[in-house]
Image (cartoon, rainbow, N blue to C red):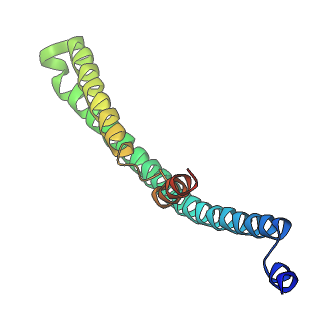
Amino acid sequence: MDKSAASQAPGLIASLAGVTRNTFGLLLSRLELASYELSEVRNHVLQLIVVFALALVAGLFAVAYCSVMVVFLAWEKMGWTILPVMTLGFLAIAVGLALYARALLRQDKLSLPATMAELKADRDMLL
C-alpha cells in the first residue's frame, strides 16, 4: 500500500516541472498584457503627434499674420521698439505652453497602469 500511495504523489521533478509551466504561463500572460497596453499607448502617442503637428502649422500661420499686422499697425507710434515687445510676448506664450505640456505629461497616460499593477501583485505574491 505504501508503494501505491508514493506512486500517486507527484515527485520533486514533476512538481518543479509544474511550477516551471505555471511560471512560464504567468510570464506569457504578463507579456500579452504589456503588448496590449503598449499598442494602446502607441495609438495615443500617434494621435497626440498628429494633433500637435496640425495645431502647430495652424498656430504658426496665425502667429505670422497676427505679428505682421501688429507690427504694421504699431510701427508709426513705437518704431522699432515694437519688435522687442512682440518678442517678449511670444516668449511668455512659449513658456506657458511648455508648462501646459509638462502638466499633460504628468497625467500618466503613457505609464501602463494595468501591467504595473499586475507586476506589483506578482512581486508581492512571490515575496
**x and y, in percent, of residue 121 in the image:** 50, 58
At horizontal 26% and vertical 15% (from top left) the residue drawn is: 84
Which image quadrant is residue 21 in? bottom right
Farthest residue, direction front: 1
Of residues 79 and 38, which is closer to you in this image?
38
Q: Quadrant of the N terminus?
A: bottom right
**x and y, in percent, of residue 95 in the image:** 30, 28
54 is higher (above) or lower (below) than 66: below
**x and y, in percent, of residue 70 in the image:** 21, 30
Of residues 49 and 36, which is closer to you in this image?
36
34 is higher (above) or lower (below) than 85: below
At horizontal 58% and vertical 58% (from top left) the residue drawn is: 38
51 is higher (above) or lower (below) than 82: below
Which image quadrant is residue 26 in? bottom right
Q: Is residue 112 left or right of residue 19?
A: left
Q: How many marks?
A: 0
At horizontal 51% and vertical 60% (from top left) the residue drawn is: 118
**x and y, in percent, of residue 68 in the image:** 29, 31
At horizontal 55% and vertical 55% (from top left) the residue drawn is: 119
Q: Is residue 52 left or right of residue 89?
A: right
Farthest residue, direction left: 77
